[in-house]
Amino acid sequence: MSQSESQDPSNKSKKPVKLQSVKGMNDVLPVEGIHWENLETLLREWLTAYGYRLIKTPVVEPTALFRRGIGEVTDIVEKEMFSFIDRLNGDELTLRPEFTAGIARATIQHNLTYAAPQRVYAMGPVFRHERPQRGRYRQFHQLDVEALGFEGPDIDAELIVMLSRLWRDMGLEGVRLEINCLGEASERLAHREALIAYFEQHQEMLDEDAQRRLHSNPLRILDTKNPAMQAMVNAAPKLFQYLGEASLAHYSGVKRLLDDAGVPYIENPRLVRGLDYYNLTVFEWITDALGSQGTICGGGRYDGLVEILGGKPTPAIGFAIGLERLLELYLESAQPDDAADLDVYVVHQGDGTARRAFTLAEELRDAGFAVVLHAGGGGFKSQMKRADVSGASVAVILGENELNKGTAAVKLLRGEGEQMEFSQDTLAESIFGLLYGEGEAQ
Ligand code: ATP
Ligand code: MG
């Protein structure tokens, strides 16, 4: 509440304005948090198995980075960026709408590929001002993977094969792979001229979007979802007809390695991806299980980007996974474990038990257990209810009786089981024995 509001006596009866999260930006609540943690753990293990290392770049970058890196006439730069002026110093800044440009900037700034090429990944929130709907948010999360300094085609295939392993590890079915080869800039230019000429011949069929893109980004017209334009777009000149020998060889190289690995793919000559910087290999992984926002991963080669941003020529390729979409798919198809990773819930009641329970919980944590100590009072029954829903494997119960004897009662929380009593001095060993069938139970 501002000062003037709080001083206005007529305002007293009014309730303060309800504060809500920004439209399209979601909270992840604790019940979902456990799934996020599990997914992130699984992803990190998978990335480590392929030698990828974590890189973290700022959430905010100079706006110029994305204008130059992503391209002026892309959806992202034209209408999706959260850009603002830092009112303290006038800097033009943007919340990152993707990771690749920032990672390319960091690569140049720190001369990362000087001694050897780099395999890196980043994970975190990205921001795009889009119309919020299922699978499309204004703050969402990506896992971004980049291989910098490699010419391919082996690394192109490695990234794709790696993704196919991930879906397998996660138990996902029905994720299909589409690939295409975008060739090099000169080849695309020849194709682009042919496209413009073709679309000019069909002016009367172009919708407003297409009219606008005719001279700025005619390739994007191929991506149209307008049914009235499908037939005309299908008959447009194909980039494939303009690819030279080197591009074709690169493409066959990728496909051969995918065949060797037994990874099926669909060649989609209309797959162009939304950003300017791609060349040669591009790919997407798509599912029908998520409604209309079915692309869970998109990627491609961007050999020119580092140079465009002022660095040395550095061939590179990468992809990004939309984690909200991946998580939704994972929860639908794989039903992963959602139990909290908790071993012990400590219940205590009676004079003096709170103090000892506090140190006992610390002792159990010293021994390596994950422990929640009951806080906030309440009777024995209500404490035991909390223990039951906590997800812990055992409850440790400390009453005045036990306190006086130097013991603690222990009860298994899953399945049937008598309450047992153990000495406090060897409590950790006893619980370990109870849970894992080893060690000495008293
Ligand atoms: P789309 O065509 O769906 O807009 P895109 O080409 O803009 O996708 P990329 O820039 O390739 O998407 O981002 C990689 C992945 O991030 C997408 O495949 C998707 O899974 C996810 N993604 C993109 N935009 C959003 C969004 N607004 N909300 C949630 N996830 C998104
Ligand atoms: Mg988009």
Image (tube, rainbow, N blue to C red):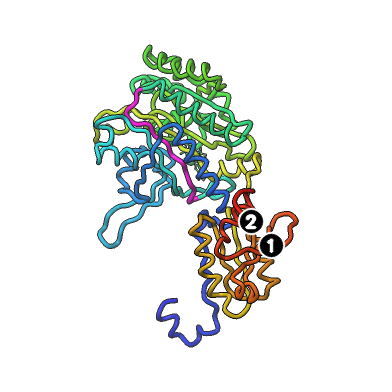
> Horizontally, is 188 left or right of 331 in the view?
left
Quarter holding residue 105: top left
On screen, 357 above or below 4?
A: above
Which residue, given by chain and number where applicable, does mark 2 sit on?
441
Q: Nearer the viewer, residue 421 or 80?
A: 421
The residue carrying pointer 2 sits among few (fewer than 14), some (14 to 19) or many (20 or more) residues within 10 Å by Cα, namely some
User: Magenta region: which residues?
Assistant: 138-151
* Image point (51%, 44%), residue name: 41
- Residue 179 percent location from the top left of the image: 50, 24
On screen, 234 above or below 112?
A: above
The residue carrying pointer 1 sits among few (fewer than 14), some (14 to 19) or many (20 or more) residues within 10 Å by Cα, namely some
Indicate the amino acid at tag 1. Met
* Image point (31%, 30%), residue name: 117
Say whether residue 146 is magenta.
yes
Which residue, given by chain and number where applicable, does mark 1 sit on?
420
Q: Are marks 1 and 2 in contact (CB under 8 Å)?
A: yes
Residue sitting farthest toward the top: 245
> Horizontally, is 353 left or right of 43 in the view?
right
Say whether residue 48 is magenta.
no
- Residue 302 percent location from the top left of the image: 36, 30
Q: Nearer the viewer, residue 324 or 359?
A: 359
On screen, 421 above or below 177?
A: below
The N terminus sits in image quarter: bottom left
* Image point (46%, 37%), residue name: 320
- Residue 432 percent location from the top left of the image: 59, 53
Beta carbon at label 1 within 8 Å of ligand 1: no
